[in-house]
Amino acid sequence: MDRNQFIGLILMFALLAVYFTWFAPNPPPAEELTTQEEPISETIEEAAPAEENAEALPAIPDSIQATLKTQQYGAFAFAAEGEENEKSIENEEIIVTFSSKGGRIKEVVLKNHMDYLGNPLILVDGSKSRSEMVIDHNGKMINLSELSFVPTVKNFNDTTQISYVLTDGSFSIVQKYLLPPSGFQVAYSLESKNLNTVLNATDVQFNWNHAINRAEENLEDGRINSNVRYYLADGDYDELAERSTEFEDATLGSQVKWVSFKQKFFTAGIIAKEAFRSGYVSQTVDFGDTTSVKNLSMQMLIPYADFANNFKARYFFGPNNYRILKNVAPDFEENLDMGWGPLPLVNKYLIIPIFHFLERFFSNYGIIILLVVIIIRIMLAPLTWKSHMSMAKMRAMKPELDEIKEKHDGDMQKAQQEQMKLYQQVGINPVSGCIPMLLQMPILFSLFFFFPNAVELRQESFLWAHDLSTYDSVLRLPFEIPFYGDHVSLFTLLMTLSTILYTWSNSQITTVQGPMKTLQYMMPIMFLFVLNSYASGLTFYYFVSNMVTFGQTVLFRKIIDEDKIHQLLQQNKKKNANKKKSKFATRLEEAMKASQEAQKNKKKKK
């Protein structure tokens, strides 16, 4: 210890001695010491009256409360009191619950649909979804959802009307909701009187924040199939990135006709009779909340003139069924994913009409899918027949083609030129067998979008599949295989095996050689991984389609006489021996020669 530290300690002890000598508190009397030694329970009991006295603070006078509310709400202060009351109305499809706070829709339940746990499907959840209107009262932004409206309910020939009224006698706001006996739409109108005396003539904000309740077992699939969609008055449709789980937003600068919160099988939205002036939409995912799929929001501007002179709109709360959506508003059927390019046309005018026609006669959707396969295969039979005939011609000419290969062994260019000459003489178009197959592709791709998004298949079981709108699982794996998953889909497995069988069968009778013969077996294996988590309705369709196609192939082989075809081709060869080449054949031959020359020049340079 150095000299400074020693002096410091001496000073500290000196200060403590002075304090306890002249400034120490007097000891408590003996009675107080006795009281402090009483049991803890008695001390708590004695302290209780003091807590009660602390709670019984004087209430804020009503006059002061009224002044504060007037400062906050101005002329609307009279409606800032009162507790929230709820009223519900319903029709055959939906139950709509309203709140007296703001006279707004608070909850919507779809009566004929359940969530994955078997509970009633709550499309709009009052604890997660909130809509509101914000008005400009002399510079104060008043949120109508904080004001109490008075409800009245009336019935007109099975149509229910619920009205919410806010009035002080000098001005009024009346919101009316009309629910027909069936359907998924709620008509809305807002009527007002003398609002010009209390409001600034600025646009009214309509805000709707909506967290989508989890309705399906596969949460990740639900998140990449939900988003905000909108349609502008000039006819432009657009949407936020559906598969994104990041924050997405868009500013809608022009007039907006409708905005929807779309999820995989259901949609909630609002359609304005006169367009919203502009708006802003956004979406994000709260990964910590497994009860919600996505958080969506819209902030729309209602022109003040429309608000003050009877603003009208319609709400939609229902399934993504094409027949229902197409009658709601222009392009509202875009809330059902039907593919891109020409694929929606195939779904709208071929697949969906066939599907809904069969629904009138059959209730088992597995049987309906089976019949859809048969109908489509019959429709495509002429193309399939043409493809098989083309392959039969190629098989009939196989001996001549093999001779050409042996003759020009190692010179592929000359061999190809002579093959093209032979095709021209016998009347074979080498690509004619591919064209019918290409024409069938739009149907196959359309079904790729139709089945996973068909609400008709939702929670419909068939054989071991408990829900045809999602994957069937016959075995849960204790681990996850990359790009495959942690389950085994039997329909996908059967589809893969049937595809391999069909490919092997075709390879026995086709002229495909080399690497292509091996590559054709890779596609089924790839689809085994890709489709393992897809809708079982889709993989069941592909499996049945493969089996029907295999049956068609066997039938066509028995019908087609390849010997007779060979004779006809030989006759064509004699007739066309001196025939001039077609323009297509000439161009093809010139292209092949040019390619051959280019390869020779490259070899010379090396």
Image (spheres, rainbow, N blue to C red):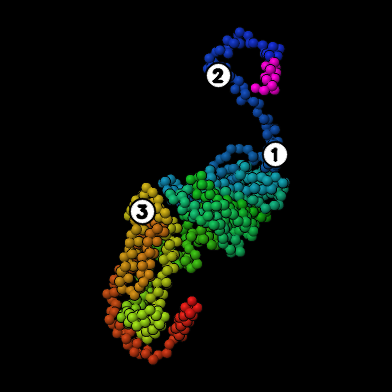
Outermost residue, top direction? 30
Residue 479's x, y, as percent? Answer: 38, 49
The answer to if 14 sits in the magenta stretch is yes
Q: Secondary structure at mark 3?
A: strand
Which image quadrant: the N terminus?
Answer: top right
Q: Main secondary structure of the magenta part?
A: helix
Task: Measure the C-alpha gap from mark 2 to mark 1.
Answer: 43 Å
Q: Nearer the viewer, residue 565 or 18?
A: 18
Task: State the residue position of label 1.
Answer: 70
Task: Measure the C-alpha gap from mark 3 to mark 1.
Answer: 65 Å
- Amino acid type, callout 3: Val
Q: Secondary structure at mark 1?
A: helix
Q: Nearer the viewer, mark 2 or mark 1?
A: 2
- Amino acid type, callout 2: Ile
Which contiguous range is marked in magenta?
Answer: 1-15
Residue for point 57% across, 48% down: 209
Task: State the residue position of label 3.
Answer: 488
Tag on residue 44? 2
Outermost residue, bottom direction? 578
